[in-house]
Image: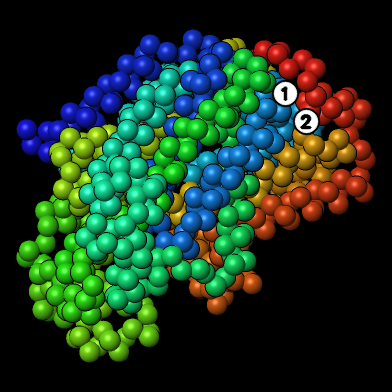
Amino acid sequence: MSQYAINLLFVGASFALYIGIAIWARAGSAKDFYVAGGGVHPITNGMATAADWMSAASFISMAGLLASGGYANSSFLMGWTGGYVLLAMLLAPYLRKFGKFTVPDFIGDRYYSRTARLLAVICLIIASVTYVIGQMTGAGVAFSRFLEVSNTWGIWIAALIVFLYAVFGGMKGITYTQVAQYVVLIIAYTIPAVFISLELTGNPIPGLGLFSDYKEAGEPLLTKLDDVIVALGFHDYTADIDNKLNMVLFTLSLMVGTAGLPHVIIRFFTVPKVADARWSAGWALVFIALLYLTAPAVGAMARLNLMTTVYPEMVGENYEQAALNPIYYENRPEWIKTWEETGLITFDDKNDDGRIQVYNDKNEEFAPVAAERNWKGNELYVNNDILVLANPEIANLPPWVIGLIAAGGIAAALSTAAGLLLAISSAISHDLIKTMINPGISEKSEMLTARISMGGSILLATYLGLNPPGFAAQTVALAFGIAGASLFPVLMMGIFSKRMNNVGAVAGMLTGLCATLLYIFTYLGWFFIPGTNMLPNTPDNWIFGISPLSFGAVGAILNFTVAFLVSRVTAAPPQHIQDLVESVRYPKGAGKSIVH
């Protein structure tokens, strides 16, 4: 059986499973559509939350970022993991106890303000739409390679599959579909990692293999990787970074953004009791850890595999001689030929010698060495988003492993896309139309509105996926910054401060959102369109060296500060609101079910 047929079999079987589950778990009421009926088991919800959380950025891009940036990009791993702990400990149980369907629901009622609710909807939509771009981009990458279609067709196929199981199933269908998707993606991620770890280090546990000896050289794998890439002008893989402030702010931005992501928060509204929300969070951390403890090993091993593929003699210790003998382009391995067809790997023979030179042509100190070797620039471009997907082929693993990782990559993108699209459609149908525009709408009409909103959101996400502003994890990082700067502070203050009022909340959200968007647009352009930025996006132009991807943390601090100061000089919330805050934070009524 050909590799294409195997890929088609694995991906097709997973699609059939998802659509079958959606038909079986079709939402029959608004409560089913928004919170899966409010009766999901904590373990089931933990697994669904893990799938919702581990997006295309986690499955596809994170290891690619670690592979290309090493320690410098470990902020992604620390921020996303730490943020989930923040969410689980400080927000999820209390929001579940509040007993509503959506994040704007909580903000609107807690701050007794239609303006606050509307602003929360706007913030939610901006963050979720930005986030979903990364999922559609990741799905396009996976489809274009494994189903041998164009990136455009890949995104349209992904949109169709999400439409079939999300529009009809709602949260109920999405929940059980995400359980299946978690099983698919975690198996797909760990099996290739085990094979590769065994091949390179002899250790079957990737996380331990990362700190084991590289079999070919008898030295630690990370030491070997450092030696290989330094010989080609790159910084040490394990090297520290100079701009500590930016790293801290970026990690914090990812943390508060994680805790403010509406599509993850609403997962905790699906369980029967507050205690179940806590248990769901605990189980989700276990399920997430299985992938996140493996990702650093996958990234490092992918980078080493790539470099020794181009420079086969790098397995030895004579790095200077090995660098003079990269492979000839005509002798490139099959996996490079395969990925070239997608356009995600490209080769440009700049010195016309027929060989593939891969090195850091941005390193001025290495320039004399490159000139002496007659190298005229890096010749192989490899998209970061493909490294995890290409890993099995790089390591010559069996065809069924490649088919499995194809299904896993697609599952990761689709699971998070569905959760995001549900959050967007819920905000439109429930928070805008049901609550603000037409409170008398029937349940049947509300569900129809929710499904139409979902369909419209899918079309918008598809368009944006076809015209993405960056690779998946970069786009996702921007979404986290926006969510962290706008929603996280008002959620935290709404739970832990009885004095926080509606004026302070609105002022804080506006400040955090506007400051963050202005900073992003200044350096990345209006909706990240090249050429529309006001200042060049370089560290020399950033304020205090703070990257646009890191500014969400600053936006959150501004949000907290403005909200606190404004609330102190304006009237305190009504007594019944203060009593509400008190009741949310203490156990009385903790077992109360959600009431629509």
Between tags 1 and 2, which lies in front? 1
**Amino acid on which disc 1 is placed:** Phe
Dots 1 and 2: beta carbons under 8 Å? yes
Depicted 281 relative to depicted 318: above or below: above
Drawn side of residue 331 relative to residue 428, left or right: left
Residue at image mark 2: 110
Depicted 37 relative to depicted 486: above or below: above
Label 1: element kind: helix
User: Who's the residue at 73% across and 51% down the image?
Assistant: 559
Q: Quadrant of residue 263?
A: top right
Q: Quadrant of residue 67?
A: bottom left
Of residue 120 and residue 483, the one placed in the foreground of this image is 483
**Amino acid on which disc 2 is placed:** Arg
Label 2: element kind: helix
Of residue 265 and residue 589, the one placed in the foreground of this image is 589
User: Who's the residue at 49% across and 66% down the image?
Assistant: 532
The spot of residue 141 in percent (x, y) is 29, 47
Residue at image mark 1: 98
Depicted 314 relative to depicted 33: above or below: below
Q: Quadrant of residue 126?
A: top right
Give the spatial CA distance, label 1 vs label 2. 9 Å
The spot of residue 292 in percent (x, y) is 45, 43
Specify the label residue 374 is tagged with. Answer: none
Drawn side of residue 154 relative to residue 60, left or right: left
